[in-house]
Image: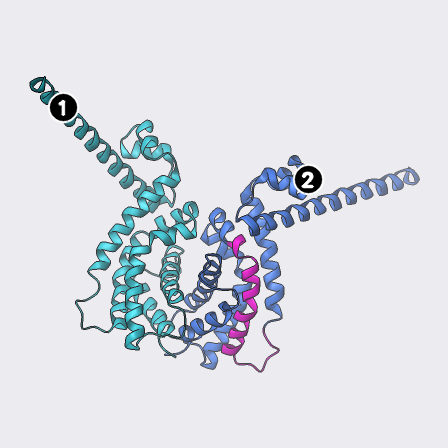
Chain colours: A cyan, B blue
C-alpha cells in the first residue's frame, strides 16, 4: 500500500502546486490590470477587468468577491512597493533626523505620484481610516524620524507626535490630489512639500 | 370671463404655493434627518431616512433619486452654515492678514467639528474634487487673506498661492479626521491647527 500511495500523494501534491501557481498567476494578472484601469480612468469595472486580465468572471469573483476586496489588494501591493523604495531612503546614519525626513519626502514622492489615482479611487471605497491603516508601515518610518528629530531638537516637541505624522501624511496626499487636478506639476511637488513640511515640523 | 377666471387663477396659485411649501418642508425634514443619521452613524440608509424624516419613500426619491444627490444637498447646507460663521470671522480691518487667518481657523473649527462625519461620508460618495468644489466659498475667504498676507509680507510668497490654500484646507480636514478617530480632542484642535499652519505659511 505504501508503494501504491506514495506516487498518488506525489501526483496530488503536483496537481495542488499547479492549481496554486495558476491562482497566483491569475491574481497577479488581475491586480496588474486593476492598477492599470484605476491609473488610466480613475476607476475599475469588474466585467472589463476580467477581460483585461484574461481570466474568467468566475475566477475574478472567486479571488475578489467585490471592488472593496480588489482595491484593498491593489493598495497592499502599492504600499509594498512604497516600503521597498522608502527602506532605501534613509541614509545609513550620520544625517540628522530632520534632513533624513526631507530625504524620505523626496524619495516618497515618485511612488505617491505613481499611485495617486489608485489612492483616490481606493479612498472612496475603503474610507479614510482603512487607507490610513494601509499606510502603517511607511508612516512608522516617518514616526521614527520624528521621534529621533524631537530628541535631537530639529523637530518640534510642542505638538503631539501623532499629529505631526498626520500632517506629513495628509500634506503628501494633498499634493498628489493637486497634481491629479492639474494644479501642481509632479516635478515641482517634492521641493514644495519639503518647503511646506519642514517649517511646520520645526521648533518655534 | 375675466370675472370668472381671476378667482380660478388665484385658487391655482394658492394650490401651487401650498405644494411648494409642502415640498420645502419635506426637503428640510429629509436633510435634517440625513445630517442626524450621518453625524450619528457615519452613513445614511435611504429606507430608514424616509421613516426618520416622516415622509413617504416616493417623496424621498422624488427629491433625492440617490444617496449622491442627498449628500450633495446636505453638504450644500453645511457649507452655507460654515459661510455664515466665517463671514463674521474676519474682524473689521486693522488686523494683519496673517492674524486674521489665525482667527478664521479658530472660528472655522467648531463648524468643521460639527460636520466632520458628514465630510467623511460625503467624501466617499462625492469624491475629493467635488468636495473641494463645495468648499469654494469658504476657501475664497482664506484665499483673500493669503493674497493680502503675501502683499503685507506676513505670508510666504515663495510657494504657489493655490498650494497654500490647499495646505490650509487639507490640514483642517486632517484634524477633523483625527478627532473622529479619537487621536485628537476637539478642544485642543484649533490651537494645534494655528500652531501648525502659521509656520507653514510664514516667509522663510
Q: What residue would you read off at disc 1?
A: A9
Quarter of the image with the N terminus of chain B is: top right
Q: Is residue B84 above or below residue A150?
A: above
Question: Local crowd at mark 2 within 10 Å, few (<14), some, or many (≥20)?
Answer: some
Residue in the picture at 51% in, 50% down: B122
Question: Local crowd at mark 1 within 10 Å, few (<14), some, or many (≥20)?
Answer: few
> On what subunit does the disc labeled 1 rest?
A
Q: Is residue B183 above or below residue A96?
A: above
The answer to whether tags 1 and 2 share a subunit is no
> On what subunit does the disc labeled 2 rest?
B
Q: Position of residue B32 (x, y in %)?
A: 64, 50
Q: Is residue B126 left or right of residue B85?
A: left
Alpha carbon separation for disc pair 1 and 2? 66 Å
Examine the structure image and report whether residue B107 is included in the region drawn in magenta: yes
Magenta region: B90-119
Which residue is nearer to you in this view: B201 or B42? Answer: B42
Amino acid at each position: 500500500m505504501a508503494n501504491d500511495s506514495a506516487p498518488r500523494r506525489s501526483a496530488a501534491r503536483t496537481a495542488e502546486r499547479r492549481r496554486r501557481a495558476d491562482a497566483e498567476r491569475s491574481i497577479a494578472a488581475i491586480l496588474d490590470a486593476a492598477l492599470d484601469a484605476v491609473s488610466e480612468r480613475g476607476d475599475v469595472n469588474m466585467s472589463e477587468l476580467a477581460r483585461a486580465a484574461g481570466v474568467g468572471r468566475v475566477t475574478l469573483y472567486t479571488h475578489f468577491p467585490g471592488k472593496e476586496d480588489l482595491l484593498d489588494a491593489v493598495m497592499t501591493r502599492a504600499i509594498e512597493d512604497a516600503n521597498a523604495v522608502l527602506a532605501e531612503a534613509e541614509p545609513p546614519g550620520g544625517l540628522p533626523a530632520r534632513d533624513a525626513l526631507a530625504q524620505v519626502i523626496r524619495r516618497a514622492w515618485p511612488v505617491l505620484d505613481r499611485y495617486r489615482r489608485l489612492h483616490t479611487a481606493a479612498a472612496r471605497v475603503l474610507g479614510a481610516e482603512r487607507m490610513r491603516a494601509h499606510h502603517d508601515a511607511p508612516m512608522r518610518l516617518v514616526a521614527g524620524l520624528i521621534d529621533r528629530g524631537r530628541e535631537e531638537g530639529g523637530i518640534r516637541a510642542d505638538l503631539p507626535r501623532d499629529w505631526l505624522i498626520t500632517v506629513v501624511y495628509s500634506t503628501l496626499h494633498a499634493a498628489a490630489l493637486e497634481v491629479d487636478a492639474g494644479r501642481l506639476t509632479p516635478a515641482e511637488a517634492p521641493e514644495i512639500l519639503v518647503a511646506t513640511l519642514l517649517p511646520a515640523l520645526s521648533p518655534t
